[in-house]
Amino acid sequence: MIIVPIIVFTLLMAAERLSPTNLGKIGGQTLLVYMVTTTVAIVIGLGISNVMDPGSGITLASGNVNTEQAPSLGQQLLNIVPTNPISAMAEGNILAIIFFVLVFGIGMTLVREEADADSSIRNGIDTIFETAEAGAEVMFKVVWGIMEYGVIGVFALMAALFGEIGIEAIGAYAMLSLTLAIAIALQMTIVYFLVILRGLVGVSPLAFLRGTREALVTALSIRSSSGTLPVSMSNAEDNLRIDEGVYSFSLPLGATINMDGTAMYLGIVAIFAANIAGVSLTITQQFAILVTALLASVGTAGVPSASLVMMAAVLTQVGLPLEVIAMIAGIDPFLDRLRTMNNVAGDLAVSTLIGKWNGALDLTTGVWADEVSTGDAIAGDPSTD
């Protein structure tokens, strides 16, 4: 009931930010790096999951598994483009829905840019975008209501699970949490700290952490990338010394589409669901998970536990039981804090890189000043204050 409407509304909201006005040099660089880091995050999540095998050893007897023959890789790619978008929505073909809505949304931004300021076409497109934003807020309220009353069902399902499996269920939850923690640690250490900050920007990751600690602590506390956005922007300007022309676009866009922690979690949960359902995922199916998680992360709202909705999209794509979502909903608030912190760290690291590439990063002030004096950072072109 909620998957398709949320995907449609949130993706249209994301597409509005991808207007031709924004997608200049800085916008194109930001979007490309965000897509790369998210793809790497999913690969890390799937890789760690295949090694650690979370969920193995327990069985979900009530889960309904789609055992149809998985299509080939080529067919998976062809299926992304729907023959009939309305039919795709009715059938729950998630990849096809995401593809069509993104194309339609970007098409609307192109038409709006070409239309006269007071034309009926431009006004109509603005109305559609406003309707999408209102629809998204309505669906978030619906999800909130489901989660408020869903705690009763979550309690019952987890109680039944412990009653059927016993203490081994705790081990399954612990392994799922550990898998995510390791994946996030690798993503932040290798991708953000070593590759982006130390390698491409040439600054100290410790200085970056000092400059972003308020945003990271806020993300851990409130579990919302969007809610953390004012703190992230303040840290970017005051501490990281990124020019407003960069962070005013990259950070709001990141809070909308750059969900590295969420994307890797979707892959991890898919492996977890497959293990407790007693099925093995082929390489083709894991590729489908990668593509679905990448595109679904674009439409994931930056609000607490929004990934539970997108999780249903990923599991549906490969025919895994949706009962798994109810099983892990009880521990999701804890895991959501880690994911949100990862998301915010990624937004700020990428913004720092884009600032460096465009001469919009002042490495002589802020948290970088001490690093420059000790030779730990490489001075770049200071931005104009």
Image: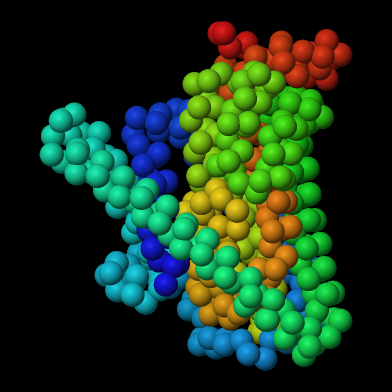
Front residue of 157 and 73: 157
Which residue ends up furthest to the left in the rendered image? 120
Q: Where does residue 139 sit, x and y in percent of width and height?
A: 43, 59
Q: Quadrant of the C terminus?
A: top right
Instruction: Classify 303 as above or below 28.
Output: below
Q: Residue at x 26, y 41 (%)?
A: 126
| Residue 37 in sight here | no
Q: Residue at x 63, y 75 (%)?
A: 152
Q: Quadrant of residue 82?
A: bottom left
Front residue of 231 and 250: 231
Q: Quadrant of residue 201?
A: top right
Front residue of 67 and 169: 169
Q: Where does residue 178 sit, x and y in percent of width and height?
A: 81, 62
Q: Where does residue 210 sit, x and y in percent of width and height?
A: 78, 27
Taking 251 as reference, is 15 left or right? left
Instruction: Classify 238 as above or below 190.
Output: above
Taking 330 as reference, is 80 left or right? left
Q: Quadrant of the N terminus?
A: bottom left
Q: Where does residue 172 sit, x and y in percent of width and height?
A: 80, 74
| Residue 153 in sight here | yes
